[in-house]
Each structure stands twice: as C-alpha cells, then as structure tokens.
Image (tube, helix red, strand yellow):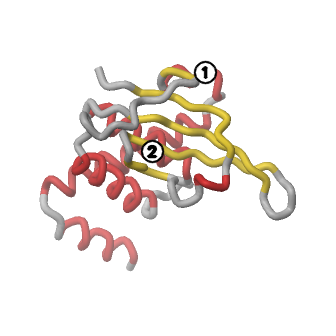
Amino acid sequence: MRFVRILKLICSLDMTTMLLFLEAYTFLGWARILKSIRFTKVIDMFGLQMDETSISPLHIDRRKVSSVASAIQTMSRYTPWDSKCLVRALAAMKMLERRKIDSTLYLGTAKDETGSMIAHAWLRSGPYYVSGAEEMKRFTVVGTFAKKAI
C-alpha cells in the first residue's frame, strides 16, 4: 500500500522535480555505498581536507542549494537503507558539485547523555546549511572538507 502511495506521489510531480528526486535517491545510494568503504580509501573524494569554502553568498545560487537540500531531505525518508547525516551530506555535496556550487563537509563529535562518543556530519554551501544543521551546535568540529566548483 505504501509503495502505491509513493508511486502516485511521484507521478504527480513535474518532470524537473521528478528528475531531481531521482538524482537525490541515486546519490543517497552512492553515498551509502561510499560509507561502507574504509574511510582512508575514499577520503580524497570528499574534497580538500581541513579547508573550508567561502561563507559569502556572492557565487551561490540559493534556489539551487535549497532545491538540493529539499530533495535530499525528502528522498532520505524513502530509501530502504539508512540515510542519516553522513549519507545525506555526501549525496548533497555530490549534487552541488554537479551544479558547480562550492560546499564544505563538516565532521563533528560529541558525547551523548550516557557519555558515549557520537558523531555527526553536516554540509554548508556559502552561508546556507544544506543538511545536518538542526544538530550541528552540539558537536565539536574535528574535520572539514572543502569541495570547490571547477
């Protein structure tokens, strides 16, 4: 029943939105596979380590960034795999890279209520947070990766 509801929803979308959602779903899958590979083998795909892109909004198309953020947020709810913060951030980074838009991936750590170490990832493009912003304040940044548009 849920599948039929999702199919009806997809068919009601305009072609541009449908393609954007399909792209987001595809990159969420790509990012999930990437997450399962040892970090040292894929680290170069994340961008320039311990660097950040500009926070200036001058060369950032807010509409494109917003549509990518929305597509990632929406489609991450419909993946049969786990699409949490790192998967979302990597997928959004790749989508922004395809649009020649700079972004910075942040990796952070913190301790939860029981004292156990937890991690979080979020993505920023210019002054806009694309994913993971709702929890980022709790975490101490331990790594950044700048993906600059070429």
Mark 2 residue element: helix
Callout 1 crowding tier (Cα within 10 Å): few <14, some 14–19, many ≥20:
few
Q: Amino acid at mark 2?
A: Gly
The quarter holding residue 150 reads top left
Residue at 60 percent of width and 21 percent of height: 41
Closer-to-camera residue (2/38): 38
Closer-to-camera residue (107/20): 107
Give the vertical position of 52 relative to 18 (above or below).
above
Query: Would residue 63 be found to the left or right of residue 74 on screen?
Result: left
The quarter holding residue 71 reads bottom left
The percent position of residue 88, horizontal first and vertical second, equals: 47, 48
The percent position of residue 122, horizontal first and vertical second, equals: 52, 46
Q: Please report whichever mark, 2 or 1, sits nearer to the chain's N-terminal start.
A: 2
Q: Which quarter of the image is occupied by the N terminus?
A: bottom left
Query: Would residue 32 be found to the left or right of residue 21 on screen?
Result: right
Residue at 64 percent of width and 28 percent of height: 39
Tell me the residue that label 1 is attached to: 41
Mark 2 vs mark 1, foreground winner is: 1
Residue 29, numbered circle: 2
Give the vertical position of 101 relative to 131 (above or below).
above
Closer-to-camera residue (39/56): 56
Give the vertical position of 1 relative to 85 (above or below).
below
Residue at 40 percent of width and 43 percent of height: 92
